[in-house]
Image (spheres, helix red, strand yellow):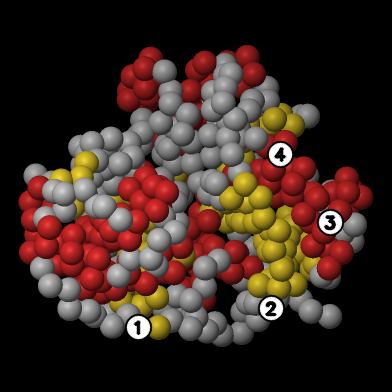
Amino acid sequence: MTDTVAVLDLGKTNLKLLAIDAEGRILDAETAENRPVAGPPYLHVDADHVWHWLLAALGRLAARHPIRAIVPCAYGSTAALVGEDGLVQLIMDYEADPPDAIKAAYTEAAPSFGEVFAPTNPAGLTLGRQIFWQASAFPGTFARTRHILPNAQYWAWRLSGVAATEVTSLGAQTHLWAPLANDYSSLVDSQGWRRLFPPMRKAWDVLGPVAAEVAAATGLPAVTPVLCGIHDSSANYLRYLAAGMSDFTLMSTGTWVISFNAAQPLDALDPTRDTVSNTDVHGNPVACSRFMGGREFALLAGDAADATATLDDVAALIGAGTMALPSFTDSGGPAPGTGGKGRIIGPEPQTPAARVALATLYTALMASLAIDHIGSKNTVVIDGGFAGNALFCKLIAALRPCQEVMVSPDRDGTALGAALLWKWAVQAGPIPLGLRTVPTPDIRGLEACAESWRRALG
């Protein structure tokens, strides 16, 4: 019998349920859109949609494959407040913007950067501020909270009925975790929330078999185990740990471009440049940088996003003096003070290819700047959505000629990493990754363009 696991890859905009075998091959997948719902009382996750889709998708997958276990992985900055009978409040979407009074009050309550190694981010991107908002604005319903469950662990709880907390989910810039102390932050204790977090479990721990209602709805065997689960970017990083890699910079790309470099000490991080600490599956802090690269690419490319651009298109933009300056989202990422100030200088691109070339050049310049801020001098590995953008990969290689730049062929690294959690404790040895080296192209004017771009940031 094929040892197949079902991985729930819960993304901010896309839902995936993948059947992955013991060799790391994706055998099958179910997908759907994941869209938030406008208030009242705030922008929130459509949990009913996710749940009904998940049960149906599990049923379809189980009819085609012998599912041995279920592994949830999910994006961060999201948590569920649950009571005796389920949710006590709607799950807040991280793009929900708190009222000014909440922002001001949280400024006084927030832990220091030197404790949590994460700044307070725009909107609801800091999970601690989300929970503070829910507790302050809705004290009656918050009082009924029995558990605060990070995103992946909420879905593990829905599937198994067992509540748990897990370190990668807590340690993803939430303000809830102090990575050097390996403990909850002072915010958690000052607000009296520690009692609301269920026991800490390993990401690979089996919480229990599927709940009876899940087995009945999906046709899964009643003994099918549900694992605790993991934060999505940490799942992707896990693949490289499993391959025996240690001294490298991982550029994990999608809606967010999140880069990891364990060689950078946390005390070198700069909160103004969105450098933060993530936490790996073993509880070790890892220096990271981040910005919404996928979102910014889409905003710049617009309806031309599917066009193909070449190095010649980039060279033409450089020759014309056209460049995009940050930032096209609320977060300036590695360019502090630029949130919402993005603009194009020089002649506007006139063709779809030129538009994509500009979006790709801008994203590569931002990504290269971001990894500078986490001290990247080692091998760079590009993973995720932008790994399929050959022009982006070539630009990173050209912008960093003194470093080897490699690209992963796998577009579902998050799910593949999460699948490794099944039988993680008995991994036989390093896993193959199939990385390939990106040759460094010669792009006329790129070095001067990059210098001019950085000067324009001030």
Near mark 2 (Cα within 10 A), the count class, few <14, some 14-19 or many ≥20, is some
The Cα atoms of the two marked residues, 4 and 1, are separated by: 41 Å
Of callouts 2 and 3, which one flags the residue occurring earlier in the amino acid sequence?
Answer: 2
Q: Secondary structure at mark 2?
A: loop
Q: Nearer the observer, disc 1 or disc 2?
A: 1
Near mark 3 (Cα within 10 A), the count class, few <14, some 14-19 or many ≥20, is some
Residue 132, percent across and down? 47, 25
Residue picked out by circle 2: 22
The Cα atoms of the two marked residues, 4 and 2, are separated by: 30 Å
Residue picked out by circle 3: 59
Identify which residue is drawn at 33% across, 23% down. 108
Instruction: Kindly identify the amino acid type of the residue bearing the numbered disc 1.
Output: Thr
Residue picked out by circle 1: 437
Near mark 1 (Cα within 10 A), the count class, few <14, some 14-19 or many ≥20, is some
Of callouts 1 and 2, which one flags the residue occurring earlier in the amino acid sequence?
Answer: 2
Residue picked out by circle 4: 49
Asked if the residues shown at circle 1 and circle 3 are in contact, with their CB atoms under 8 angstroms apart, the answer is: no
Q: Secondary structure at mark 3?
A: helix
455 with respect to 134 (left or right): left
Q: Residue furthest front?
A: 350
